[in-house]
Image (cartoon, rainbow, N blue to C red):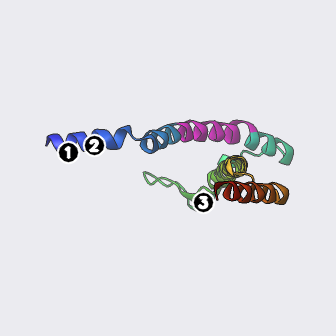
Amino acid sequence: MKKFISEFKEFISRGNVIDLAVGIIIGSAFTAIVTSLVNQVIMPAIGFVIGGINFEDFRWTLAEKSGDAPEVAIYFGAFIQQIINFIIISFVVFSMVKLINVLRRKEKAEDKPVAPSAELAMLTEIRDLLKENKLR
């Protein structure tokens, strides 16, 4: 049991797991922000431009409310809002991944050692040959 606990502690303390946890928390908070942006800013503005339409009210009624039976409807307005949420989140995540990839490429390019010029290689070879002749 102690070995299991120590292995679990090692697994949790690795940077990747902690980074993943932080990413999930930030992603959750970001989703709430985008949902608020879409529901309370973008959709009301679109509704105003179209003519005072509230997208949440868009629905296709299959059966009207009768007696104790509730209305049966397909709420495609809410679905449209979720599609807009998805598009915005996807665009932001894509942009972030693209930026991270560009930064990684720059970092790799800086890490590569510069090959010596042809002149420097020739001079190094001459130096090595002169050293060999002195040793003989």
Q: What element carries label 1?
A: helix
99 shown above or below 18: below
Question: Vertically, is 30 above or below 91?
Answer: above
Looking at the image, can residue 58 be seen?
no
- Toward which corner of the image does residue 43 lie, by quadrant? top right
- Name which residue lies at 15% across and 40% down: 2
Mark 2 crowd level (few <14, some 14–19, many ≥20, 10 Å Cα): few
Q: What residue type is labelled 2?
A: Phe
Tag 3 residue? 61
Judge by depth and name the residue closer to the eye, 113 or 90: 113
Which mark is on residue 4?
1
Q: What residue occupies the far bottom of the structure in this picture?
A: 62
Mark-to-mark CA distance, 2 and 1: 6 Å
In percent of width and height, residue 106 lies at: 73, 48
What element does badge 3 sit on? strand
Task: Judge whether 16 appears above or below 118 on screen.
Answer: above
How far apart marks 3 and 2 lie (CA) works out to 53 Å
As for residue 62 lying within the magenta part, the answer is no
Q: Where is residue 93 in the image (x, y as percent from the top left)?
A: 65, 49
Judging by the rendered image, the residue that carries numbered circle 2 is 8
Query: Reading the chain from its start, which is encountered first: label 3 or label 2?
Result: 2
User: Do the residues under discs 2 and 1 have CB atoms within 8 angstroms?
Assistant: yes
Q: In this view, does 18 lie to the left or right of 30?
A: left
Q: Where's the N terminus, which quadrant?
A: top left
Characterize the magenta stretch by its predominant secondary structure: helix
